[in-house]
Image (tube, rainbow, N blue to C red):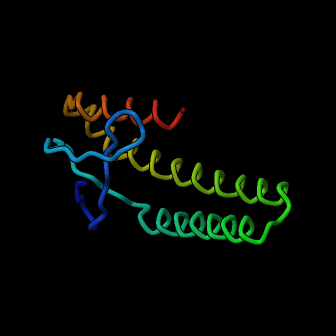
Amino acid sequence: MSKHEHGVTYTHGNGDGHEPRSHSHSHSHSHTHTNTKSVLNRLSRAIGHMNAVRNMVEQGRDCSEVLIQLAAVRAAINKTCEVIMKDHLEHCIVDAVETGDTETLEELKRAIELLMK
């Protein structure tokens, strides 16, 4: 995990999307997270949907209802990813391009590959 501006901690994957890994390299760009509150609110919403799914399964609710709730989870996560990606592109990636930071660009490519799976 690495801690960035605003105290937000990020865990970077090991490339297979299953286990987190830490890394010791330092980015040559600064992290400006203008949407931290929005991301945290969206994550809370997704967690709430997941808790509802768990309760529904425990209660033996109809499969269609569970699937609809899971669709809400997926939508909440996708929107959270969108907000983070927009923030990253507008700040970190712009800076990386301006400074020639190819490592950050490669990390973005890996992140997009994992998101698209």
* Residue 46 image position (x, y, % from top left): 59, 63
* Residue 95 image position (x, y, % from top left): 26, 40
Residue 10 located left or right of residue 82: left
Q: Is residue 77 above or below residue 117?
A: below
What quarter of the picture does the C terminus occupy?
Answer: top right
Q: Is residue 21 above or below residue 40?
A: above
Q: Residue at x 14, y 41 (%)?
A: 25
Q: Is residue 96 above or below residue 92?
A: above
Q: Residue at x 20, y 28 (%)?
A: 100
* Residue 28 image position (x, y, % from top left): 16, 41
Front in this rendered view, residue 30 or 50? 50
What quarter of the picture does the N terminus occupy?
Answer: bottom left
Front in this rendered view, residue 100 or 17? 17
Front in this rendered view, residue 97 or 4? 4
Residue 92 located left or right of residue 116: left
Residue 104 located left or right of residue 25: right
Q: Is residue 20 above or below residue 73?
A: above
* Residue 41 image position (x, y, % from top left): 52, 69
Residue 103: name its quadrant.
top left
Residue 42 located left or right of residue 37: right
